[in-house]
Amino acid sequence: MTAAEKHQVSRSSTSHAGRRRQGRAGIRDVAAAAGVSITTVSDALNGKGRLPDATRSHVRAVADRLGYRPSAAARTLRTGKSGLIGLTVTTYGEEPFTFTEFAYFAEMARAATSAALARGYALVILPATSRHSAFDIWSNVALDGTVVIDPSDRDPLVTELVRSGIPVVSDGRPAGNLPVTAWVDNDHEAAVRGLLDHLAESGARRIGLLTGTSTDTYTRLSTSAYLDWCERVGQEPVVEAYPAHDPAAGAVAADRLLARPDRPDAVYGLFDPNGTDLLAAARRYGLRVPEDLLLVCCSESAVYAGTEPPITTLSLKPGRIGNTVIQLLIDAIEGEGSARPVEQVMPTDLIVRTSSRRRPPRTTVSAPRGPSSE
Amino acid sequence: MTAAEKHQVSRSSTSHAGRRRQGRAGIRDVAAAAGVSITTVSDALNGKGRLPDATRSHVRAVADRLGYRPSAAARTLRTGKSGLIGLTVTTYGEEPFTFTEFAYFAEMARAATSAALARGYALVILPATSRHSAFDIWSNVALDGTVVIDPSDRDPLVTELVRSGIPVVSDGRPAGNLPVTAWVDNDHEAAVRGLLDHLAESGARRIGLLTGTSTDTYTRLSTSAYLDWCERVGQEPVVEAYPAHDPAAGAVAADRLLARPDRPDAVYGLFDPNGTDLLAAARRYGLRVPEDLLLVCCSESAVYAGTEPPITTLSLKPGRIGNTVIQLLIDAIEGEGSARPVEQVMPTDLIVRTSSRRRPPRTTVSAPRGPSSE
DNA sequence: CTGAAAGCGCTAACAA
DNA sequence: TTGTTAGCGCTTTCAG
């Protein structure tokens, strides 16, 4: 084969003598078909350079006709940006993504996905551990940045990511002094204080706490805020703790709390299922809610609007958090690494429902009671 | 600069004369530091070739010491595999991922993520539409395959993906004759027949259906199975339909169904929130469940185990579906495209609870009733 | 305004 | 057994 022949062949096909006819059209194919250079094709398609509109639209038409799709891999290699953001939850160990269990994760992830997409990025769901299966999936995907939900103390994953130079933003303030790029968290202490005040205003004399045995920041901050509040108002703390991972344990702990001799007349439950469990326990002990027992739990679940009675919840606004996390991360990615970490504390929402109102409005009580209590 | 000098420089640094000192170590840096060639480094790290164990471990040690992370982008470009699988839900329009609303998506996505990770792939969450923001995010990420949940008729996204040669597996059978690589779906007709039989066995004389107004496959198949069943047993159909997207409409429809002159003594609701809505409606009309009204709805939500009374649900087993979808997709990706499409129909589970049992067992009734009925 | 050429970092033939 | 070389498909200076 002469040089000329070779040249001709590599023009019409994709370089290697004539084979690989089935593969998608490449940028050279488009260039050849449009009668321009590959540079012009690239510029035309990316809106770079200053080509005449005629050339631009011609190239686009040809590309369309050939069904040309630029190779993301090549673009990533060349530009160093993949448009991909990792998302992981490290709290609850191996199993990837616990969003089934907690509405918080679902909403947070949804908002984060949405926010990322709006800025041209996509989320990749990754496992909590660095070494998952045979080979490390983390280093198999080109990430522009990573969101870590609830990083644990001295999380090795975070450390490694940061060391390898990729921005990391965490949902939940990092516990040890993890070198995250930025973090977003709720003001858990203010939230607990606020809701305890609300319960006290509703007439609570002795407020109990249903908390977890683990040492994550959320549990720790919330519990100590409760203890501080008790000390401030001079109430003896009434606390039951259980391993939050275990859903069955929650029901038992709820029961235990209401079985105590110093039974509280109001309870705050830190975790999503606590409301249901407490309500069931109250029913078993013949306690009316809210007359005999005021109830609040931290949850994003919609079910608490429909229980009997509806239960007051503390919402952490996970959607807002997910969105903020993504904004900070993308800012860091695109801002060429702006040195000092950003910390953002966000407010919570107490959604007050019947379970924590001492006197529910007459109207809603009498109307539905008619047909239901036969 | 002489050729020799140039050679020397490009050995010690990363190719271009001495600059770019801050970037992560590349494969050449490792090769230089270990005193071997880059091929040897590549082989040692990937377990390819047949190097002496000494070399292998030496190279690994050096790579570790330098904090070497291989470039996923380069690997992807070279090998043509990214290890990335797209995940999208097209049913409910623009908004990416509706997993907040339906426990089905959450569980399906969780299982899919887990299954993919176990085989060395990660999931990327992508929007339903091809043209999302300014530029097309779909063509900005290198995908080895895609999972599409509930593709709509002649989905342009699916068509385009398939045309560009990437395997697509759908959760839910494709409606038009979309050219998906494979699909997985429940046997919705058998499920509906089974649950109607169950209701009839529990004593139902007139079973109503709460369905949707949209024409997706699930709604269509379930509704027609209901109508067929009615015809077979000689019951006049009692149907109320509402736009399933609108949560408020569901409650209204539930109410309408129980307000009819030909009020059913049993109801099946096709969508997740129907159980709660029907229960509320029943209460409003003074109907006891299950004594006056038998209830079943299709849902993955755990709340139905805790309602008063617990409600029988039809589970589509989304976890199993998510897992199967991923297996089929990865098989297609790694199996070099095995021609003919694979169709997989999977069974459902009817989780029978109090709401559809005419006579609940004595034991579970008397024990808890003690403390609760003061 | 357009084209040629140089790689991005890696893997896989092919040589040595 | 190890090293050399040729690209994967694209973007981006830098000449024309």
Image: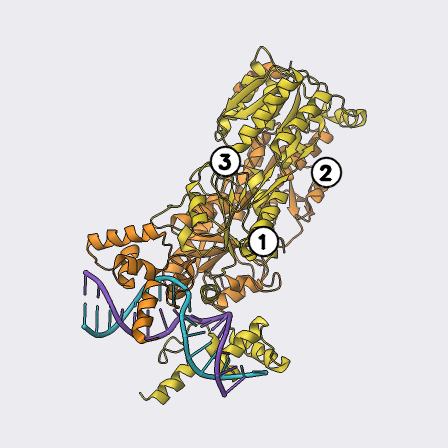
Chain colours: A yellow, B orange, C cyan, D purple
Mark with earlier residue (1, 3): 3
Residue A346, image quadrant: top right
In the displayed structure image, the side of residue A371 where residue B212 appears, left or right = left
Inspect the image, locate mark 1, and give the three-letter code of the amino acid beneath it: Asp
The residue at the point 57 percent across, 71 percent down is A46
Please tell me how crowded label 2 is: few (under 14), some (14-19), or many (20+) other residues with Cα within 10 Å.
many
Q: Secondary structure at mark 3?
A: loop
In x, y percent, where is residue B346?
46, 47
In x, y percent, where is residue A109?
56, 46
Residue B255's disc is 2
The residue at the point 63 percent across, 22 percent down is A229
Q: Secondary structure at mark 2?
A: helix
Quadrant of the rendering where the C terminus of chain B is positioned: top right
In x, y percent, where is residue A192?
63, 28
Furthest residue in direction right, as rendered: A363
Camera-nearest label, 3 or 2: 3
Residue A331's disc is 1
The residue at the point 41 percent across, 43 percent down is A129
In the displayed structure image, the side of residue A369 where residue B300 appears, left or right = left
Q: How many marks?
A: 3
Inspect the image, locate mark 2, and give the three-letter code of the amino acid beneath it: Asp
- CB atoms at circles 3 and 2 under 8 Å apart? no
In x, y percent, where is residue A342?
58, 45
In the displayed structure image, the side of residue A227 where residue A12 appears, left or right = left
Disc 2: host chain? B
In the displayed structure image, the side of residue A194 where residue A11 appears, left or right = left
Which one is in front, A153 or B11?
Answer: B11
- Is residue B192 something that shows in the picture? no
Residue B292, image quadrant: top right
Please tell me how crowded label 3 is: few (under 14), some (14-19), or many (20+) other residues with Cα within 10 Å.
some
Quadrant of the rendering where the N terminus of chain B is positioned: bottom left
Label 3 sits on residue: A175
